[in-house]
Amino acid sequence: MAELLEVKNLSVTYRSPRGDVQAVRDVSFSLRPGEVLAIVGESGCGKSALCRAVMRLLPDSAAVSGEILVNGVDIAPYRERELQKLRGRLFSMVFQDPLTALNPSMTIGAQIAEAVRVHDRKAPREAVSARVGELMALVGIDRAAERMHAYPHQFSGGMRQRAVLAIALAGNPQILFADEPTTALDVTVQAQILDLLRDVQQKLGTATVLVSHDLGVVARAADRVAVMYAGRIVEIGTAEEVYYDPRHPYTWALLRALPALARHGEPLYTIPGMPPTLIDPPAGDAFAERNEYALAIDYREAPPMFRITDTHFAATWLLDPRAPKVAPPLGGLRHEG
């Protein structure tokens, strides 16, 4: 199957008074039609900047390099006027906080209708109203005729997120970026939103990039998982490969920190130390200072991406044939040199 989206050697640098912040560093990945790719990592690792760079929603202080190919066409050189034609139709985004994404002075129905008209300015009022009802039903907002007259503050957090999703889907995008869509929601509602994203993907065939800081949250929705640390993708593979055969020590640490894997009576594992500053990132493996399995070379030289299978890659010197064999700290997971 042809790739819908190919990102090649993408880097994002923010200019600041303290120096240039290398938020995204030489990232490459692909996305197939109808696929759900989860991008996970701690806050500040570059997940959101990566998604905004693809959609070109970055501030003027950001410098972007690399290729962004959509259906084989590089859109990285596109000007803003050309990009405006793509946003909403080719790709769309569900932002992290629905309360700030929605206009508090407009009804939910009016905001969805506004998004519909942006993509079809000649649509008659009846068609727009019918489309609003369809979108509300698609995202699980029942009693649409009644609830379209409600304001954002009258909706629960989960319902507001559904409304934001309806707006994002108004232009029938091929690619949906969901940036931490379950933040500030309770566990039950988180599961409902993730199931909804998967349901929408299956009904519409929309490819989805799901951003989260929680490996446990995305387990139920993702086909593939990319793990980011300090602006780089350090491991990528199918969900099964990353969860059941993780190879990067940072992925091990994220999995060990999941409450579901905590042993009874033992304290929850926390990753020691702090991520490095991206104004002057380390020359070697950025995770080395926090990595109890770090080798001497980790402090000097950044590892390449090692191929494990046709779909599974990880950037760790532990996969070098010359490296010592290390058993992962998660029982039952194999590690072959």
Image (cartoon, rainbow, N blue to C red):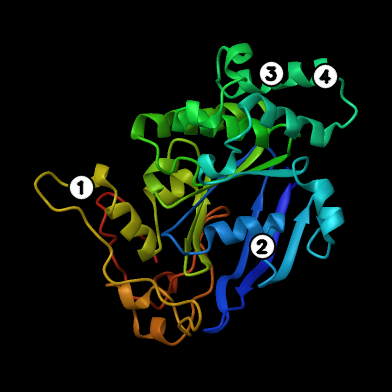
Q: CA distance from mark 1 to mark 4?
A: 55 Å
Q: Nearer the viewer, mark 1 or mark 3?
A: 3
> Circle 2 is placed at which residue position?
58
Q: Is residue 249 above or below residue 21?
A: above
Disc marking residue 134: 3
Disc marking residue 112: none
Q: Is residue 19 above or below residue 39?
A: below
What type is the residue that disc 4 sits on? Arg
Answer left or right for 212 relative to 111.
Answer: left
> Circle 1 is placed at which residue position?
262
Answer left or right for 219 relative to 197.
Answer: left
Q: CA distance from mark 2 to mark 1?
A: 39 Å
What type is the residue that disc 1 sits on? Ala
Q: Residues within 10 Å of mark 4 (few under 14, many from 20)?
A: few
What type is the residue that disc 2 sits on? Leu
Seen at 35% across and 85% down, the residue is: 296
Q: Is residue 240 visible?
A: yes
Seen at 55% across and 20% down, the residue is: 140
- Name the secondary structure under disc 4: helix
Q: Position of residue 19 (x, y in %)?
A: 55, 84
Q: Is residue 201 visible?
A: no
Dots 4, 3 in contact, CB < 8 A: no
